């Protein structure tokens, strides 16, 4: 399985949650597969998906899922101790780990070599870290949502990309509709 | 009342409930006052761009954020300021220690000080400079301005303002 197949698989689960989606292809894929107002698409700023998601989670009660990549987590490795030491039980960090910088042409990352992001997360103090195969991502993600315990998921998958259009939505529109979803109360 | 406490009181009066900090010796008193203030969630970050990500999230989650950092951070955060805070039009008061100004004992700090205002100017970031004791009187108005216009705003505080180094 490649990342876009995981995203297609979990899109029905993401639909009802606040989602912060990583820059580049992950955002473009999720946007194409199932655009939701409750998704904050990152159009720039590689590495900050987990930080933005943690900030949203700490500021309000709803569940927040940050979709990140192995390359992006490596860019902002300092995020893992911050997450570990500021527990938000409504926060899930889903790292889709394909061992490569997908959006820039599949150059290999160190996570695809000797570095285990799950082990790094545990060493940083994250208490619930689950590494799973791509095919299990949906089940593991749903269980994490239901557990209401802060969870870091590392979903291992193949590298590879599909053709997707860039997101042309205005960033302020993306931000505004996301914020409306944050405060929306279900009827 | 100490200047640090006055600054934190202005934060609280302006509804700021989420503050991230990257340490600087000059700002130690403010950081300690933030940590003590029960109405503020204090979340230290490991790098300033990470802190700006946290602040962006907190803002979207409904809490007014602020970041406390050293001016060296301007060199670290240009991309984040431009592609996150400014691109999505988010407010962010940045209380900054202006190292490398008069009374600075560490030569290397001057190397970043000479670029600080130029970079902020290049980024079209409204910039205020607290140089004399008492300049903090303007903080309340600066915070109101920041949340009115949804922009990152810089408040540089130098060694003269803090009464020496």
Image (spheres, grey):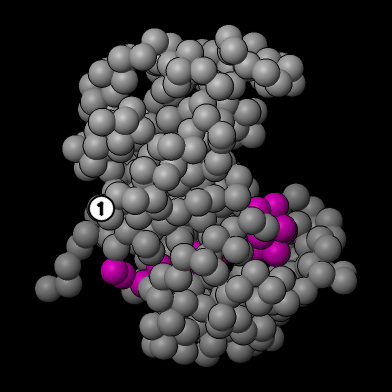
- Residue that label 1 marks: B39
Residue at 56% across, 82% down: A128
**Residue A63 spot, x, y in % from top left:** 36, 72
Q: For the N terminus of chain A, give its image quadrant.
A: bottom right
- Horizontal and vertical percent for residue A4? 62, 69
* Quarter of the figure with residue A145: bottom left
Q: Magenta stretch: residue A62 in it?
A: yes
Relative to A103, B116 lies left or right = left
- Bin the neighbour count of mark 1 within 10 Å (Cα to Cα): few under 14, some 14-19, many 20 and up: few
Give the x, y percent position of residue A15. 38, 72
Q: Quadrant of the C terminus of chain A?
A: bottom left
Q: Could you tell me which residue is drawn at 67 percent across and 58 percent down?
A: A77
Q: Is residue A133 above or below residue A18?
A: below
Horizontal side of residue B146 vs A95, given as left or right: left
Q: Is residue B11 above or below residue B74?
A: below
How many labels sit on residues? 1
Q: Is residue A6 visible?
A: no
Q: Residue at x 51, y 55 (%)?
A: A51
Residue A53 against residue B146 in the figure, above or below: below
Residue lying at the far left in this picture: please name it: A187
Secondary element under disc 1, as helix, strand or loop, is: loop
Between A23 and B156, the residue placed more toward the observer is B156
Chain of the residue displaying label 1? B
Taking depth in this image into account, of A83 and B10 the one nearest to the observer is B10
Residue B137 belongs to the span the image colors magenta: no
What residue do we see at 58% from left, 9% from top?
A: B102
Res. A110 in view = yes
- Stretch of the chain drawn in magenta: A61-76
Query: Is A170 drawn above or below residue A116 in the view shown?
Result: above
Q: Position of residue A59 (x, y in %)?
A: 32, 58
């Amino acid at each position: 399985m490649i990342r876009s197949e995981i995203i297609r698989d979990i899109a029905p689960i993401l639909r009802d949650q606040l989602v912060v989606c990583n820059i580049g292809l992950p955002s473009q894929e999720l946007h194409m597969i199932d655009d939701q107002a409750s998704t904050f698409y990152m159009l720039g700023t590689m590495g900050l998906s987990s930080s933005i998601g943690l900030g949203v989670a700490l500021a309000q009660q709803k569940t927040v899922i940050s979709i990140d990549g192995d390359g992006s987590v490596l860019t902002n490795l300092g995020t893992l101790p911050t997450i570990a030491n500021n527990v938000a039980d409504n926060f899930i960090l889903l790292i889709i780990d394909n061992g490569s910088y997908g959006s820039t042409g599949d150059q290999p990352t160190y996570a695809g070599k000797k570095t285990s992001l799950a082990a790094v997360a545990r060493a940083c103090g994250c208490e619930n870290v689950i590494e799973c195969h791509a095919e299990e991502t949906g089940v593991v993600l749903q269980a994490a949502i239901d557990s209401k315990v802060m969870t870091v998921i590392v979903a291992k998958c193949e590298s590879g990309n599909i053709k997707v259009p860039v997101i042309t939505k205005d960033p302020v529109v993306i931000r505004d509709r996301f914020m409306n979803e944050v405060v929306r109360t279900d009827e | 009342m100490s200047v640090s406490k006055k600054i934190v009181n202005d934060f609280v009066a302006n509804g700021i409930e989420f503050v991230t900090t990257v340490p600087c010796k000059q700002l130690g008193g403010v950081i300690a006052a933030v940590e003590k203030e029960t109405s503020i969630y204090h979340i230290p970050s490991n790098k300033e761009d990470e802190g700006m990500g946290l602040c962006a999230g907190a803002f979207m989650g409904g809490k007014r954020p602020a970041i406390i950092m050293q001016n060296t951070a301007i060199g670290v955060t240009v991309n984040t300021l431009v592609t996150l805070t400014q691109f999505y039009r988010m407010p962010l008061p940045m209380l900054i220690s202006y190292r490398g100004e008069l009374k600075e004992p560490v030569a290397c700090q001057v190397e970043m000080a000479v670029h600080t205002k130029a970079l902020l100017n290049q980024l079209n970031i409204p910039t205020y400079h607290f140089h004399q004791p008492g300049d903090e009187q303007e903080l309340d108005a600066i915070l109101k301005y920041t949340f009115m216009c949804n922009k990152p705003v810089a408040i540089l505080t130098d060694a003269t303002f803090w009464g020496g180094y």
